[in-house]
């Protein structure tokens, strides 16, 4: 008796062997996260993230996204961050409101060009976010944490720590720190 694996089967087998039980859980279609001031709601449907008025359902902003693992508002309700799947990890997309206009931008770990990276912790502040990534660089593994001000896109308080493979591999692809 012979067994053949299809290309999909091989990918599935490799995923199960390399990452057993590991990996973030996608938000369900239709997931809603209301802003702290209860005036705006973020609605996630696969491939689309919408920002709407809670009372009128008016669409303020819509952005194309891949799979989303988490949505968080700043405490002042001016910014939303989404943790999004990318090849070999995850990154963050920020939507920021300035008066009536919304802008969006991606956040990647500051520093050298990294091979793979994934958000492992996220904390919403009054008007900013603290983000922690696990990163594989050309010659080492790191944990990088920093603050981002969505209004100015300024990154501050960058901390980069080299870690061993055992510690790095135990970090989840996404885990809340709240």
Image (cartoon, grey):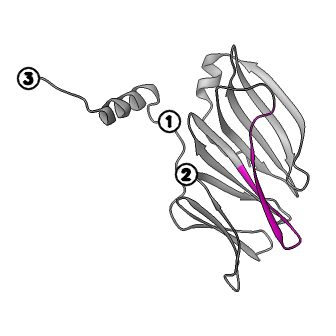
Marks 2/3 in contact by CB < 8 Å: the verdict is no
Dot label at residue 67: 2
Q: Please, what is the dominant secondary structure of the magenta stretch?
A: strand
Crowd around label 3: few <14 · some 14–19 · many ≥20 (10 Å): few
Q: Among all residues in the image, which is located at the extreme top?
A: 139
The circle on residue 1 is 3
Mark 2 and mark 3 lie on one chain; the one further toward the N terminus is 3
State whether residue 119 is above or below residue 93: above
3D distance between C-alphas at marks 1 and 3: 33 Å
Mark nearer the N terminus (1 vs 3) = 3
Residue of label 1: 22
Q: Where is residue 105 in the image (x, y as percent from the top left)?
A: 76, 51
Residue 116 in the image, given as x and y percentages of width and height: 63, 29
Left or right, 61 with respect to 129, comes to left
Q: Give the range drawn in magenta.
A: 93-110
Left or right side of 53 for 49: left
Residue, x 77% and y 77% (percent of image)?
39
Name the image quarter holding residue 167: top right
């Amino acid at each position: 008796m012979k067994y053949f694996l299809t290309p999909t089967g091989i990918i599935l087998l490799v995923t199960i062997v390399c990452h057993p039980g590991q990996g973030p859980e996608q938000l369900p279609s239709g997931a809603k996260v209301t802003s702290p001031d209860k005036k705006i709601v973020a609605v996630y449907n696969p491939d689309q993230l919408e920002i709407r008025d809670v009372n009128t359902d008016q669409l303020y902003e819509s952005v194309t996204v891949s799979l989303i693992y988490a949505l968080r508002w700043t405490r002042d309700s001016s910014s939303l961050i989404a943790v999004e799947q990318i090849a070999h990890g995850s990154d963050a997309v920020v939507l920021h409101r300035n008066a009536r206009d919304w802008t969006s931008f991606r956040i990647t770990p500051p520093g050298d060009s990294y091979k793979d990276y994934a958000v492992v912790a996220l904390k919403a502040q009054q008007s900013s976010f603290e983000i922690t990534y696990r990163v594989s660089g050309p010659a080492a593994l790191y944990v990088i944490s920093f603050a981002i001000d969505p209004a100015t896109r300024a990154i501050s308080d960058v901390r980069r720590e080299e870690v061993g493979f055992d510690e790095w591999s135990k970090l989840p692809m996404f885990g809340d720190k709240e």
